[in-house]
Image (spheres, rainbow, N blue to C red):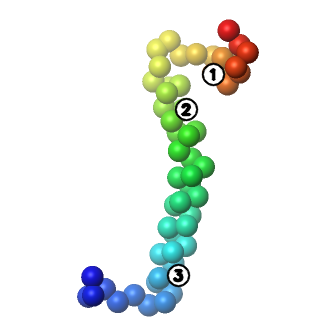
Amino acid sequence: MAWLQFSEETKERIARVIGFAQVGVHYGYLPLIIYLGYTRSNPRPSLIRLFSPLAQ
């Protein structure tokens, strides 16, 4: 990739975008998996049963 020459400002912007993406993936992955499992299950559990280990 020697043909790509980025300015320092562009490199900083790319690094900032990658940083935001990493934080978004870090904090958003597990809630996304829980949401997808909740919305695609049949029958759908109640929210209290989903989050409480004591609910039966």
The residue type indicated by label 2 comes to Ile
The answer to which quarter of the image holds residue 5 is: bottom left
Instruction: Tell me where residue 8 appears, x and y as whole percent.
Output: 49, 89
Q: Earlier in the sequence, mark 3 or mark 1?
A: 3
Q: Pointer 1: what residue?
A: 50
Mark 1 and mark 2: span between their CA atoms?
A: 9 Å
Q: CA distance from mark 2 to mark 3?
A: 34 Å
Mark 3 crowd level (few <14, some 14–19, many ≥20, 10 Å Cα) = few
Residue that appears at 66% across and 17% down: 49
Secondary structure category for the residue under label 3: helix
Residue 25 placement (x, y as % from top left): 53, 52
Q: Extreme right residue here?
A: 54
Image: 56 above or below 10: above
Q: Which mark is residue 12?
A: 3
Q: Do the residues under discs 1 and 2 have CB atoms within 8 angstroms?
A: yes
Residue 12: horizontal and vertical position, in percent? 52, 81
Q: In terms of secondary structure, where does tag 1 sit?
A: helix
| Residue under the point 51% across and 75% down | 15
* Quarter of the image with the C terminus in it: top right
Q: Earlier in the sequence, mark 2 or mark 3?
A: 3
Task: Please give left or right for residue 48 compared with residue 12 in the image.
Answer: right
Marks 1 and 2, the one that precedes in the sequence:
2
In which image quadrant can residue 46 be found?
top right
Residue at coordinates 54% horizontally, 32% vertically from top-left?
A: 35
Q: Using a 10 Å C-alpha cutoff, classify the residue at mark 2 as few (fewer than 14 neighbours), some (14 to 19) or many (20 or more).
A: few
Q: Amino acid at mark 3?
A: Glu
Question: Callout 1, which amino acid?
Answer: Leu
**Which residue is tagged 2?**
34
